[in-house]
Amino acid sequence: MTTPVATGIPTVYLVDDEDVLRDALAWLLRSRRLLSEGYASAEAFEAWLDQRRIIGPLDLRDPSCLLLDVRMPGMSGLALFDRLIERGLVEALPVIFLTGHADVPTAVAAVKRGAFDFVEKPFSDNALVDRVEQALARSAEVLGRLRHAQTIERRLAELTDRERDVMRLVVEGRPNKLIADELDISVRTVEVHRARVFEKMDVKSAVELANLLRELPSYSA
């Protein structure tokens, strides 16, 4: 099955205390038809997250990524990165660190903890925007997958207890007669529940149902 991809207008968030650099990055991104929003500090960006009530990845409306300076007055880029990890955002909001030469070992360590990449200053415009576009594609894929899983969870919540019982046995490959025997109901009743499960889960076969549920690591029959 193809991984669902989130639709929407991608946005690149720029967090750097240098106005000149933020303006230059915004101009560069516009030249590649990418929207951006700039923040002069990590605190300002975190305040925006709080204002928008972005607590977890599904609170992000559109695909996005973050260009984040490592060293800034006040909260550092690394401290903000830790806050994003706590919110579970670093997959859906990929972080590309902008670093000076002295910060490279620190940035490498951050990549090992989930940052998307780091780019040394001064950077190649084309190489940076290429990585931004790849980060936005990653964000779209992650958000699409999470929203797809949320849809499946919503469908599961609509099943009755008996329908869940039938579904579990259908997924195990049991024929209707054996399901009826195990649940002590008629074959006709099994057929009715099976049809309702397929309808609610929006599938056409037991194989499709099993594949759908396999996309939910947390699923337990």
Image: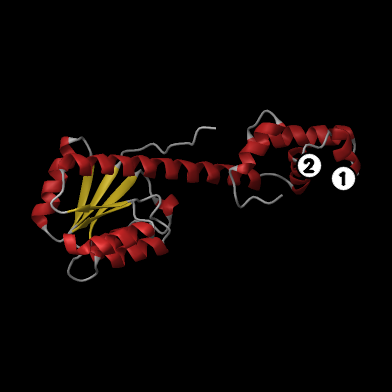
Seen in the image, is 102 located left or right of residue 82?
left
The type of residue carrying mark 2 is Leu
Seen in the image, is 152 located left or right of residue 120?
right
Decide: marks 1, 2 in contact (CB < 8 A)?
A: yes
Label located before the other in sequence (1 or 2): 2
* Farthest-out residue, top: 204
What residue would you read off at disc 1? 183
What residue sits 16% from the left and 42% below the top? 125
Q: Is residue 177 above or below residue 59?
A: above
Using the rendered image of the protein, determine whether residue 53 is visible from the camera's viewpoint: no
What residue would you read off at disc 2? 169
Q: Nearer the viewer, residue 16 or 157?
A: 16
Say which element carries label 1: helix
Mark 1 neighbour density, 10 Å: few (under 14) some (14–19) many (20 or more): few
Residue 53, x across and y down, in percent: 38, 58
Residue 84, x across and y down, in percent: 36, 61
| Separation (CA) of disc 1 from disc 2 | 10 Å
The quarter in which the N terminus is drawn is top right
Kindly indicate the quadrant of the structure image that contains residue 50: bottom left
Mark 2 neighbour density, 10 Å: few (under 14) some (14–19) many (20 or more): many
Residue 110, x across and y down, in percent: 33, 61
The type of residue carrying mark 1 is Leu
Seen in the image, is 108 located left or right of residue 142?
left
